Image (cartoon, rainbow, N blue to C red):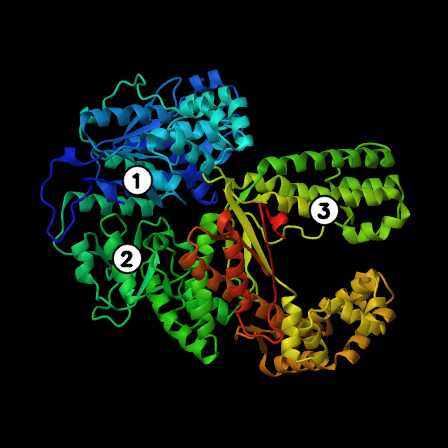
Amino acid sequence: MNVPNVLPTGDACPQPEDVSSRPLFFIDGNNLAYRAFFALPEEISTSTGFPTNALYGFSAMLIKIIADYRPTVVVVAWDSKEMTFRRQEFEEYKAQRKPMPEGLSEQWPLFAEIAAAFGFVNVNLPGYEADDILGTLARQAERDGRAAVIVTGDRDALQLVTDRVHVMANTRGVTDVRIYDPAAVHERFGVTPEQIPDFIGLKGDTSDNIPGVPGVGEKTAASLLAQFGDLESTLAQAETITATKRREALLAHREQALMAKRLATLDREAPIDIHAAELQVQHVDGGALAELFARLEFSSLMDRLEQVMRTETAVPSTSDAVEGPDGAVVATRVVAPHQLESAFDRGLPAAVVVSQAGDRAWIVQCGGARDEVLEAEYSPTTRPLLRDLLREGGLICHDFKSAPMLHDLAVYAAHDTYLAAYLLAPGLRSYRPEELAAGAGLRPAACGPDDPDTVRLILELAGRQEASLREQGMWSLFQEVELPLTRVLLDMEKTGIRLDCYRLGEIAARLQDQMDGLEDSIYEAAGGTFNLSSPQQLSEVLFERLQLPRGRKTKTGYSTDAKTLEFLRPLHPIIESIETYRELSKLMSTYLLALPAAVDPNTERLHTTFHQAVTATGRLSSSDPNLQNIPVRTELGAQIRECFAAAQGNLLVVADYSQIELRIMAHLAGEPALLESFRRREDIHVRTAAEVFGLAEDEVDALHRRYAKAVNFGILYGISAFGLAQQLGIEREEAAQYIERYFERLPRVRSFIDGTIAAAKAQGFVATMLGRRRPIPELQDGSFQRRSLGERLAVNSVIQGSAADIIKVAMNRCHSRLRREFPNARLVLQIHDELLIEVPADEAERVRDVVVAEMVDAHPLNPPLGVDAGIGENWLAAK
């Protein structure tokens, strides 16, 4: 969606224009500065150590605005340091916000200075927030009949949107933006811009600590406003609402909702002393900005600004050549659509590298008549053509998933050198293109991330990788599984999953009470207080005060690790309390405190990041936060899963492969007893217990089944008699007998394991059912322990890797079919063998059946794949 009257389009060169046709730009300085700080690594600094990450991102965004929109008037609004009228009415307004980070505080004085050097006008007003200044400026523009763009990530500002006034909101990072006009606001939130204060009054705003009506989320608020029009009408007619809880909540929290609306309503008549439309055309103060950028060591930004300013002052008839240090042309710069069109050979694949700022791309085509690198500006004018050209020919890139510009184009990779490198060498520590190229003998020198010549490396790498993938039998896995999965994961990350933070807070409070009680008992047993989190102080308590046997010596004292505590457990009651405290403390910090802090205040959902190229087996991993290791078997784990919930009006479908790894082993081994057991849908662990212990199945008790389960899964991971003995708390000889009996009853499993290890030793690698290879260098190691590890890895990689491949296929199939048949259903989470799908309540049963069918048909297996699926309001209820 384009901003109105911003830039000319078409093939003709631009003609002189009336600058009053260009939109006025109003920027929320605080919002942009904070976003820049958290979007870019804090390690970015000058050679003297002065932090500059936020200043860099802030400046990059300002340059992007100049490059894309050529504004003549820009005003930057800043929050007041004084008490605002909102805080006077509601003392808890924004009270939850942490103090400004130290790294940002150091940079803060320079933001307004940079804005002024750009020629922009800085405005703040005691007692008012930046949003109120933006609202006042927007009203001025509307009255003057001028188009305006408000740059902010604060959703409160969406109430200012009109046909003339649009909001440019950062989505991810600093330069990835979305433009909101009235239709876009309604599409995103289901309300009109004028209803935004009513919307917040009903649902509240966690980012500003504004309480709404309990139990009312975005969808409910939107539906109420669609029915009643505004907040006051909704409250006046609350008695007519049939849903009991909703009616009671509205009646009970009437005054709170009205206060929330007042807090969310922007003042559009703030007493500012400027009138934006009357400001003179502003110009960059080149000297001041050069001095600032030199001090901050922003040489690349200065170069970028100079390019932009050259484009502003002279419209070229041909592309601009950008020269390298030796004078050789390394990139041809294209700005306007007609230049991009003429420089491109339609229908040919193109390798693309996106700049770190996301505002430009370097492109080189495969097999084209020209052997040149194109530098394409990414702006509203070039976006449609760039999208069409890349779609026609096919996109070659490195790590598509980390390039938001390419996501915005909705162009998907035909070759991703990052994923291809991962398949060919899953154990590498780094997949940077210059390092991959050096490893392939393409060049000894490294290229920087914004070096145009990096795109040539990617093109060369892609050709070599395709040949290697085809030769090794992984081309189909790459093209049909890994590449399509990237867009599935992007959709999942964007959708996120709702977290019931209130419920999680209740669990945290109970856990804290339990930890406080444990602390008291530990201090009483120790004869005094100490820092439980300090290994050194704990060591002094255990080994000096209580005189317990000492174990391994470390630099700071004697070890108090888990193994040491396990050894000491029978010797003193304090040990069990310490172990429990440590376990609860880890759960508290890892889940109960960390998960709510990771919720995006704009969406009120968790947005984890999935990683395709991390694990050696092909399994997915996730981070920020890690949702792949939520506890499963504990009571607390069940309570945490209960907090992962569907939005109001939706349900979760949870589908889990049933014993997929055991089924894969049965398939690969061709073991008749296992195949028969699965065919008859028997309890596989009861059957194994009967085989190993020589019992009738009705004689197998819970202890026998637990032992058999440990043997079943232990065999998959190459468990030794010693390892099984430790896991079950039995003698090593007894564990060895269990394993031996298992192989006596299931001889083909033994043959499969031996054959897999022998093949791995001969080939140097193992392969999954879909062809994924994993090198096992440990098998050639001189150490017996390392060779034993290699044998375990060989067997496990085949089975676990095949399971990982199968669920990836299932995710692709489910995603594709749901988009066709149930567009409102969304994959939201994958945890190893389990998928979570959020669906409208009235579609839940049909979606469940579709998901089960697609998962079962993901890959032919004997015995067939089995899937357990359920439906519920939250993760636990659906299991």
Q: Amino acid at mark 2?
A: Arg
Do we see residue 181 in this rendering? no
| Residue 85 at x, y percent in the picture | 43, 17
Q: CA distance from mark 3 to mark 2?
A: 50 Å
Q: CA distance from mark 3 to mark 1?
A: 46 Å
Contact (Cβ within 8 Å) of mark 3 with mark 1? no
- Which is nearer the N-term, disc 3 or disc 1? 1
The label shown at residue 387 is 2
| 819 relative to 64 in the view: left or right | right
- Which is nearer the N-term, disc 1 or disc 2? 1
| 306 relative to 733 in the view: left or right | left
Q: In the rendered view, tell whether residue 117 sits above or below residue 567.
A: above
Q: CA distance from mark 1 to mark 2?
A: 23 Å
| 58 relative to 829 in the view: left or right | left
How many other residues sit within 10 Å of disc 1, few (<14), some (14-19) or many (≥20)?
some
**In the foreground, 716 or 342:** 716
| Residue 798 at x, y percent in the picture | 61, 73
The label shown at residue 16 is none
Secondary structure of the residue carrying numbered label 1: helix
Q: Image quadrant for the N terminus? A: top left
How many other residues sit within 10 Å of disc 3, few (<14), some (14-19) or many (≥20)?
few
Residue indicated by mark 1? 183
Do we see residue 553 in this rendering? yes
Secondary structure of the residue carrying numbered label 3: helix
| 301 relative to 205 in the view: left or right | left
Contact (Cβ within 8 Å) of mark 1 with mark 2? no
Q: In the rendered view, tell whether residue 773 sits above or below residue 728.
A: below
Contact (Cβ within 8 Å) of mark 3 with mark 2? no
The label shown at residue 635 is 3
